[in-house]
Image (cartoon, rainbow, N blue to C red):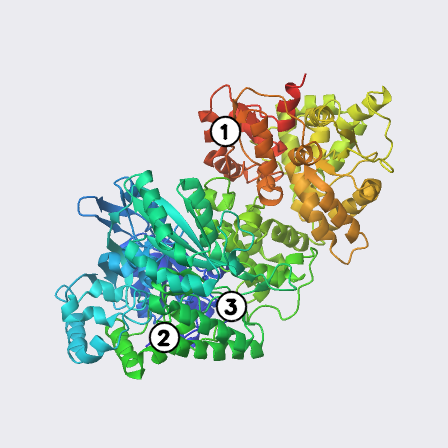
Amino acid sequence: MVDHEAGGADKAGGVNKAGGVNKAEEARELERALRRAVRGEVSFDAASRALMTMDASNYRRVPAGVVAPYDADDVAAALAVCRERAVPVVARGGGTSIAGQATGVGVVLDFTRHMRSIVSLDPDARTAVVQPGVILDDLRAAAGAYGLTFGPDPSTHSRCTLGGMIGNNSCGSHSVAWGTTADNVRELDVVTYGGERLRAGRGLDGLPPRLREGLRALVDANLAPLRTGFPELPRRISGYALDALLPEKGADVARALTGSEGTLGVLTEATVRLVDAPAARALTVLGYPDESAAAEAAHTLLPHGPLTVEGMAADLVAGATGLPKGGAWLFVEVGGETPDEARARAEALARAAADATTDHTVVADPAGQRALWRIREDASGTATRLRLPGRADGSEAWPGWEDCAVPPARLGAYLRDFRALMGRYGLRGTPYGHFGDGCIHVRIDFDLLTDAGIRVFRAFSTDLADLVVAHGGSLSGEHGDGLARAELLPKMYGDDMVRLFSRFKDLWDPAGGLNPGALARPQRMEENLRFAVLPSRPVDVEFGYPHDNGDFSAAVRRCVGVAKCRDESVSGASVMCPSYRATGEEQHSTRGRARLLHEMLAGEVVRDGWRSEEVHGALDLCLSCKGCRSDCPVGVDMATYKAEFLHHHYEGRVRPAAHYSMGWLPLWLRAGAALRAAPVLNGLSGVAPLAALAKRAGGIAPERDIPELAPEPFTRWWRRRVRRGDVGAVRGVRGVRGRTVVLWPDTFTNYLSPSVGRSAVAVLEAAGLRVVVPPKPVCCGLTWVSTGQLDRARSVMRRTLDVMAPALDAGLPVVGLEPSCTAALRTDLPELLGPADPQAAQAARLADAVTTFAQALEDHAPDWQPPKADDRPVVGQTHCHQHAVLGDAAERRLRARAGLTGELSGGCCGLAGNFGFEQGHYDVSVACAEEQLLPSVRAADPAAEVLADGFSCRTQLEQLAGRRARHLAEVLAERLP
């Protein structure tokens, strides 16, 4: 028998003794047996196990190993091996569960690698047959070709799997129209831990005799409690759906299995219902004075037949644009056969609700709707950082009571009581969610790091369970009970019903091998919290981590696992996470890297600390694009974490050659310019054997061409210009006043693309601005930062601040041309020097002073009209650092004023500074470029202007597409009179 309380891991890499494996040799034998039995991947290495220790919950359980089954036969074979050895098994999809049910000891079955096919789709029957690893958005896209969709759509729709949705009985924002996943499941193919393979649908006849007779006996003996013991509400997800087995409900076994959290059987295939997708949609956003008013109004809108009724208050969406006047809002979506019909229905609904609202807006264009929905969908991440008085970046908040549900008509009263209960415990949170279904999401600022805080967590949870039940609600309204709430199920159902749950579990899984500790015979809610293994004191680090109070552990804790970084299709201007989309490997996602860093700090699975090769291997393919800094809902900054790790990893050791060749690039380029060696070096790089030797010595990918050095650096041109009197002879900038800007001569512009600098001077001066250039070499330190040479980066930054002191004293704006360097001045400079550095104040001043080329024109020459380009189309890519740190709104406006039409692509070019030049990175670099940038350029009008403000982007386009791209400054300068 497998102990139902199993929930730990020993240092040897296996589950505890009760779980069946406790010695390293037994774990190795288990691995060997699985490799013999299955065709899919079997991974027992530290990195693979570390990646599966957590989902999106507060919990952590260490598996013995991971199996990625190739098909249903693999599932059965893996279960047979585990059953023989009494090893627990946990089925896992996208790992976005927030109650801990996607974590586990023993063996994790990862369905996201192979079993992700849409087996068939029947538009006439409106059904689809899918494997458990199918991503929801992939099914929706396939069904969309026939005007159909899968109704349930949680906010993680771009990365959650159908198997996980069925395991949790997921819902999403459209459940008021199309119900929960259980409402949309027809048949399930399942393998039990005991090895039985069955198809569950309506009726018991198709089940193996043991199950058929056992279920019939259980139902017949308990008809009264099954008919009266389950609350009637749209979002009752908690517990097992035993009432679905009642004869008057057709003994719907598939529905009873849905929401069982992988504790009864392992899903291998599902037949699901599809519904008509409205041809057009419109969104009515209704403003209300406060959250209670919005909650009271939500259920009154249901007679109008909305597709969604979502609610949120100002404390969640402070600063969001496009919302009508109010302190809380309802997002109400309606459909129609045409855009006009959808808009008319939306306006009619707004009129009907007008007596209770403060204001409203109707959004009919798809782009506007997507922008507003993004606010709601990112809430599962943004709600983890509360905006609290006295805290610039808010306080950490956690799931655990994420999705309680009450009857919709009671939502207003429940929310008032809920807020009052939080107040009594001194807790805070920002409720939002599915108001039309009475389901509330909230993350609460529990202190889960101390014993006292955990006691408060338990006491509050117990009281809240009582409150939910008093309002006739369900402890879980969407995400399941898992490890977080299952212990409290007796409060909702009573002891007798919970004993029936255990009997139901034992019928399906008498050995207790599937997901022990979840749902039936649960662990205590405070066991296996993921924070317990982290260091109790701050780790000694180099960056200041100002948004996490200087605590690297807190920075790593930012990743709560919602996995937006696992979105496999980049859309719009988003960037995160290019390396994951290129490889499809969890360890190359932002979440995967954060998990490995978490385990590095824990020291249990990943044991070598900063010297860890597992962490190094995952971070090696991080492009340091900083996309996660803006695209991750909680602002994980993996580029900074990577620089921090590399600093410690190589401290006192010889580094890779690329760190010396490209990390020290500013020094080598400056030396080459001082020697006036550009013609010689360019000539030598054109000799294939010499170039190959140089690339090998420098750790540069052999597929790459070495960029040519400019014959005349920008700063030499500038000094020559000053000497001949074309500009004032500015030796420094002290005392300079008025419409003067400092042009930052970054390394790439100065030595590799000086035409960008010359063009920028021409445009800025044409706009009436006076341009000055620092009198001595300056550098942002980026190349040293990106290679983790932080001591050297800090020295470079301090010298730069000394040179820039007169400009900063004069209050002059500093114009950056290279987005990566500009972003480094804005963020890396102040964050690396930190608040305790003697030059911290200067670093902050420079960060505040730096601006992009377009921003400088907009702010300091607002009346200047750029030369017109006669509506010339543009193609290219917004630099990832521009997107993540600087923003590109000013660039968009400048292009529009100049008559340059069209949008630039999102994503990352894949070169990303030193990344794409390093040996071993070429294929990933090309894959990133092929995602958006190269296809958009190939498909563009031949007359289109190819724009790329970043040197890396221009280089990638030239080397991979044979197209010359230009900086916006060059395009404008060309058209000056």
**Could you tell me residue 356's position as x and y percent?**
41, 59
Disc 2: CA contacts within 10 A as few (<14), some (14-19) or many (>=20): some
SS for dot 3 = loop
**Could you tell me residue 689's position as x and y percent?**
63, 26
Residue bearing the label numbered 3: 444
SS for dot 2 = loop
Query: Is residue 896 or residue 114 the one in the foreground?
Result: 896
Residue 902 is labelled as 1
Which three-letter amino acid code belongs to the residue tagged 2? His
Image point (72%, 46%), residue name = 847
Residue bearing the label numbered 2: 471
Of badges 2 and 3, nearer the viewer stands 2
Say if mark 1 contacts mark 3, CB within 8 Å.
no
Disc 1: CA contacts within 10 A as few (<14), some (14-19) or many (>=20): some
Kindly report the distance in space between the C-alpha atoms of the residues bearing marks 1 and 3.
43 Å
First in sequence: mark 1 or mark 3? 3
Q: Quadrant of the C terminus?
A: top right
Residue at the outermost front position: 355
**Could you tell me residue 580's position as x and y percent?**
48, 46
